[in-house]
Image (cartoon, rainbow, N blue to C red):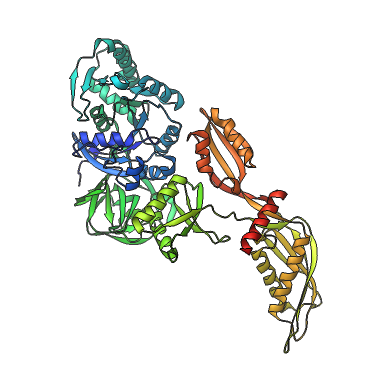
């Protein structure tokens, strides 16, 4: 256990996909001697992107953890995904972090997703430093990135170093804190020599140093006063001001370099120690009493407080079972102890505790406040659950994964695999809380929903690799419904005479529409005993049965009021069954005479899109029978709200990516049901009938 909490750091790297996050993380681990070689995303030998799906796609799909030591600090690095399909992993993993490194692609600049991803860090109040990566790539421009950070993200970006050259001529960095040039070897070894700033860079270095110290001076009134009076200020004082400004989020210190060439990593490691917070700097964490959600409880990052932790990741391993990664907020935990899962109200036995280093495990005697660790084979514990001392229960509010935006119906490739599919997908959804598995009560299909097509495809690949189950993906059936626009009366008379006792039921009903969403109303207006009381529930049951089966095209009937007003019975031949059939017959006849229509589900879309692509997106919505409800400007983006029929947006996640080159994102939720236009309804009814006949 680490006894010096002030020397602990839990730092997450965040950035849109393809910005060079994992390459930078690999360089940090290698420079800190936590790994023996410089792992490469391109070569598929990264210690952090270790899942086969990640190696094949050259991208991070799940959050990975790796500890390192640098100078006096013990750091846990959290490498998070940046692709929209896997951002739920990032949101959840950030609950374990105390600070953030925002990685920006030096060649491509600030991508549109950067603001969204930085927003997650802001939600948790995490301080950050920025690292402009890929300075060795063609078109890399450090100053352009600084300008974009200031203008697009409205950040105070304060460079603490400058690049020595850009693109092919990139050779190292100018450290503005010490006013030295650090010239690196380009072999990935991370070796460099300190020297004087070359003459051609001196003026620029002086100019940027001046800007930097102005920002630093503003963190402290007395420092500002001394600076303005021209007093000599020591380097240590500037270092303190840099730390204070970063922790207060007064500005974002910006570094630069290259992960693949391992340039600029040393200064980044130094600044993580110096500027990003320890658990002590972050202070107490607020939870609530499991028996009273209004009662707040605070836990300080102190080994002497009662133990409390939050599970920030679950790894489902077919051999090792379930591995739970947790962040300790207070107290201490040792192996072979018992804790309470306060979220579920169950006790859990803690076996061996270990730190994750990519896919390898390093066993620990125990953990203390501020650390991230893992434990295997907990019975009921999942991501988002709170583990704590049995005598001092507390529950921490867990982050919600992003809502699903795409669904597929899944069916087994091999007969008899249905049960295996379900149990295997349940295990995968324990590992990935942004997956949803449900059976549609209307269409009876098993639906797998996720945050994008790539998310679903990746899940299906994992299903095959981990559990040896293969499935087919299909577009889900649309849960249409049927209703009426008019009123009608009809008689249902069921009369059956066989050798012995016959069957007789006779019911007159009137049907009329109800407002959308009202469901079904049954009114009994029988007087004078024309139908005995005991048979009236049977009439209603017959009507409900006909409604479930559907009449127009086999879809459930909704929003109708049925009034039973007349009928007749036979003292011997009448029965519950006869009146059920009579009710069903009457309903089917009346329904077809009451202007029947088909209803379709309408979804509400909220789309965030760059202004210049707004016209393309609106044109596309219109082509899908959509209605734009409104717009809202947010920096250089427009947020479009629209209503679109579900049938038109089954593949919208991939379609929007195609239209905008991946520069837009959206959320989707069910809104209401609406009438399907006549010609389209006829086509749907025809196709449904054909499918039934087949």
Residue 285 percent coordinates (x, y)? 35, 44
Residue 152 percent coordinates (x, y)? 46, 26
Rendered image quadrant of residue 629: top right
Is 507 displayed left or right of 648 in the figure?
right
Q: Nearer the viewer, residue 275 or 83?
A: 83
Residue 421 percent coordinates (x, y)? 42, 61
Rendered image quadrant of residue 589: bottom right
Residue extending farthest to the bottom is 500
Residue 642 higher or lower than 491, as above or below? above
Residue drawn 63% across the image and 55% down it: 480
Is 64 displayed left or right of 421 in the figure?
left
Q: Quadrant of the C terminus?
A: bottom right
> Is residue 432 among what the camera can see?
no
Residue 342 percent coordinates (x, y)? 37, 57
Residue drawn 20% across the image and 25% down it: 185
Residue drawn 41% across the image and 57% down it: 470
Residue 7 higher or lower than 243, as above or below? below
Is 513 displayed left or right of 240 in the figure?
right
Rendered image quadrant of residue 240: top left
Q: Nearer the viewer, residue 217 or 255?
A: 255
> Is residue 387 among what the camera can see?
yes
Q: How many marks?
A: 0
């Amino acid at each position: 256990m680490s006894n010096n909490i002030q020397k602990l750091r839990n730092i997450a790297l965040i950035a849109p996909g393809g910005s060079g996050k994992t390459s930078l993380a690999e360089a940090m681990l290698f420079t800190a001697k936590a790994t023996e070689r410089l792992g490469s995303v391109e070569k598929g030998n990264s210690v952090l992107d270790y899942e086969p799906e990640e190696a094949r796609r050259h991208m991070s799909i799940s959050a990975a953890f790796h500890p390192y030591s640098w100078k006096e600090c013990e750091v846990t690095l959290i490498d998070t995904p940046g692709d929209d399909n896997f951002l739920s992993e990032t949101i959840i993993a950030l609950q374990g972090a105390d600070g953030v490194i925002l990685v920006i692609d030096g060649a491509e600049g600030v991508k549109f997703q950067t603001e969204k991803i930085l927003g997650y860090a802001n939600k948790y109040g995490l301080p950050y430093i920025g690292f402009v990566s890929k300075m060795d790539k063609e078109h890399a421009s450090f100053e352009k990135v600084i300008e974009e950070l200031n203008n697009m993200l409205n950040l105070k970006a304060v460079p603490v170093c400058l690049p020595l050259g850009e693109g092919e001529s990139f050779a190292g960095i100018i450290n503005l804190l010490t006013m030295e040039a650090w010239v690196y070897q380009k072999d990935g070894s991370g070796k460099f020599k300190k020297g004087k700033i070359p003459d051609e860079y001196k003026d620029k270095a002086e100019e940027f140093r001046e800007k930097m110290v102005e920002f630093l001076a503003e963190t402290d009134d007395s420092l500002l006063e001394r600076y303005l009076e021209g007093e000599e200020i020591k380097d240590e004082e500037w270092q303190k001001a840099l730390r204070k400004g970063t922790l207060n989020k007064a500005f974002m210190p910006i570094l630069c370099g290259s992960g693949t060439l391992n340039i600029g990593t040393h200064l980044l490691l130094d600044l993580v120690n110096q500027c990003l917070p320890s658990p002590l700097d972050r202070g107490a964490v607020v939870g609530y009493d499991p028996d009273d959600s209004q009662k707040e409880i605070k836990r300080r990052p102190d080994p002497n407080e009662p133990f409390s932790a939050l599970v920030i990741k679950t790894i489902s391993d077919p051999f090792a079972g379930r591995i739970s990664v947790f962040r300790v907020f207070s107290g201490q935990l040792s192996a072979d102890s018992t804790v309470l899962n306060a979220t579920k109200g169950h006790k859990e036995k803690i076996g061996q505790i270990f730190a994750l280093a990519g896919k390898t495990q390093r066993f620990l005697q125990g953990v203390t406040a501020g650390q991230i660790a893992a434990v295997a084979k907990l019975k009921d514990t999942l991501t988002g659950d709170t583990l704590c001392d049995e005598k001092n229960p507390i529950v921490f509010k867990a982050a919600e994964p992003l809502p699903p935006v795409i669904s597929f119906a899944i069916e087994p490739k091999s007969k008899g695999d249905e049960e295996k599919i379900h149990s295997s997908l349940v295990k995968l959804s324990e590992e990935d809380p942004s997956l949803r598995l449900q059976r549609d009560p209307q269409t009876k299909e098993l639906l797998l929903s996720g945050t994008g097509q790539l998310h679903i495809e990746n899940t299906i690949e994992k299903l095959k690799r981990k559990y040896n189950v293969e499935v087919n993906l299909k577009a889900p059936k649309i849960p249409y419904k049927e209703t009426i626009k008019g009123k009608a009366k009809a008689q249902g008379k069921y009369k059956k005479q066989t050798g012995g006792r016959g069957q007789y039921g006779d019911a007159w009903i009137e049907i009329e529409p109800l407002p959308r969403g009202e469901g079904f109303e049954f009114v009994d207006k029988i007087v004078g005993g024309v139908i005995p009381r005991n048979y009236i529930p049977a009439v209603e049951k017959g009507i409900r049965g006909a409604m479930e089966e559907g009449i127009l095209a086999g879809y459930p009937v909704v929003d109708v009021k049925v009034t039973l007003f007349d009928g007749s019975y036979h003292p011997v031949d009448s029965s519950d069954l006869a009146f059920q059939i009579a009710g069903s017959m009457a309903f089917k006849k009346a329904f077809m005479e009451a202007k029947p229509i088909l209803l379709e589900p309408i979804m509400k879309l909220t789309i965030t899109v760059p202004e210049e692509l707004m016209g393309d997106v609106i044109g596309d919505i219109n082509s899908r029978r959509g209605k734009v409800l409104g717009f809202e400007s947010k920096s250089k983006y427009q947020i479009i709200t629209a209503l679109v029929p579900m049938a038109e947006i089954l593949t919208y996640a991939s379609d929007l990516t195609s239209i905008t080159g991946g520069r837009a994102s959206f959320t989707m939720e069910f809104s209401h049901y609406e009438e399907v236009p006549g010609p389209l309804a006829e086509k749907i009814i025809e196709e449904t009938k054909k499918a039934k006949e087949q």
